[in-house]
Image: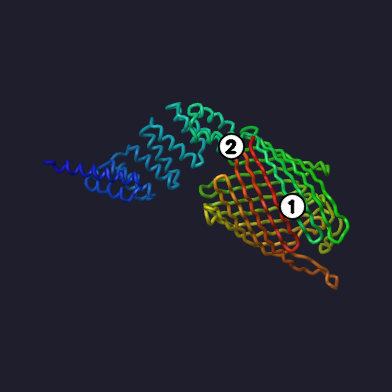
Amino acid sequence: MVSQVATAQLNIENYRAIGYAHKINGNIDSSIINYKIILQIEPNDYDATLALARLFAAQENQKESEFYYARILDKDSADTEAWNGLGDLYLMNDKVPNAIIHYKKAIYYLPAYVPYYFSLAKAYSWDGKLDDAIETYTQILKIDSTYSEAYAGIGKMYSWKEKPYTAKKYYLKAMALDPESVEIGKEFEAVLNALKYSVTARFWKMNEAEQNYRIDAFIQKYSVQKRLSNHFDLSANVLLDNSDRDLFNTIGDTQRLYSNYWAVLRFILKNHSISAFGGYSMTDSRLSSYGLSYKGLFDFGKLKVTSVTTAEYQYFFYWNQVGGKSVEENITLSYKNHYLQGGLKYGLLDSLLIQDYYNDKYGIDFNSQISYNISLGTQVLKKPQVKIAANYSFMNFKYKSPLYYSPYERNLTGMSTSLYHKYRKWYVYVGANYNIGTEANYEQNVLEKFEKENLSVNNWGGSAELGYNLKTLTFALNWSRFYNPYYANYFVALAISGSF
């Protein structure tokens, strides 16, 4: 006769086979039931305990998964499967520091087992500790120098550290060991593309109109950018503008042929960059731009802060030969799917004609500007990516000028929304906004005193872009429209960019 022990063992193996079959077929709940029955028969069954820990982890049930891993460690504190499993569990639940601690424990008890090092390196990379990840990959190569994945991992970390030339060296070693790897090949191709010449040509037809004029323009812009080293890249840019201005009810229609050339040299670190730029207009024989810009990314876990600071001179309205100096700060705070953006700008425009009777000023003088804006937005859908935002902005100039837009106390409040979706090689973007607001205007009454009135500057705008990626080339067709009672514009554009 078969003993009770043998019968129990036979039942355990039957339940184990059934549980495993359900697991393979994706029936996690049924698999859990069968492994739990095994523990009812034999509470110390290691394989069933480990299987339950992993199954609950697959269901993202952290509490139950931790319970079964703890049962294993209570009996054997050196069990590396449990330590590594807890690391996977915490990494999956975005508790990266805890994952690192548990992966280190697994390595401590089994220092020659390479897969645990790969898990630890992955956790370090998720935690932004790229140097620690590089050191972990290096430890793998000390154990076995034939791991192409370790060389590729070091290459990826240097790529994330904005050091593509160093990344290239490690990817070359990885490809030499495993030239057939599709994943490593794609990563290597991305690094090589970052080192190529990036060329963009953009052509757009634009119309803009105010109460006294309309401008029709055909504009071309060409840009070439090249990464020079791990820390520097350089771009050269050309803008050509062929415009016709039609003045209403007055004589003076003109044609404008304008050319502008500028270059940008950028110093790059992992989360920071500084750009120095300068430009010259051959048409007007003058500097068209110069300045410095800083961009920084600060990571506080789930809170990301981006700061862009710019000090510059821009020849921004070449129809009337208007330029100005400015200092501007823009900050974006992102938390999960939400963001808060704010900007502040102070500008000092060239000494040009002003007509400001309210301030008892008429003639040639400098003009100052201050403006700020704030937006609060959130992503409401993931696929397609849909965002909505509430926006507020303020702009004020010290003096009025007939040469450029220079409002008093302009306040705008509104909403904006956007949609972005990518499908295979195509992508589409659609955006729209509507704002209500006023700006101050001062007129003399019959007593020749200035009275303030608020003009409505309610406006709306929309844009759309359809793009197609073809290997190293991208084609994009863009349309945009803006309208308020005093100014309106629209344009259609075609952009072609590629790497060579």
Q: Return the x and y of residue 67 as percentages of the image width and height.
A: 33, 48
Specify the amino acid type for callout 1: Met
Instruction: Give x and y (percent) for residue 351.
Output: 83, 51
- Give the label on residue 166, or none: none
**Residue 305 at x, y percent in the picture:** 58, 48
Q: Say which residue appears at 43% left-offset and 48% top-offset.
A: 93
Left or right position of 490 against 97:
right
- 208, above or below 286, in the image: below
Numbered label attached to residue 206: 1
State the image quarter where residue 439 is shown: bottom right
Residue at the extreme bottom of the image, as rendered: 446
Can residue 153 be seen in the rendering of this structure? Answer: no
Q: Give the number of the mark in front: 1 or 2.
A: 1
Image coordinates of residue 499 in percent, x first then y, are 63, 37
> Could you tell me the amino acid type at mark 2?
Glu
Earlier-in-chain disc, 1 versus 2: 2
**Would you say residue 255 is visible in this rendering?**
yes
Q: Is residue 213 above or below residue 327?
A: below
Q: Which element type, helix, strand or loop, lies under badge 1?
A: strand
Secondary structure under tag 2 reads loop
Q: Tell me where residue 54 sits by quadrant.
A: top left
Query: Which residue is nearer to you in this view: 342 or 29?
Result: 29
Looking at the image, do the residues carrying marks 1 and 2 touch, with CB atoms under 8 Å apart?
no
Q: Which residue is mark 2?
A: 162
Q: Horizontal placement of 172 versus 322: left or right?
A: left
- Specify the color scheme: rainbow
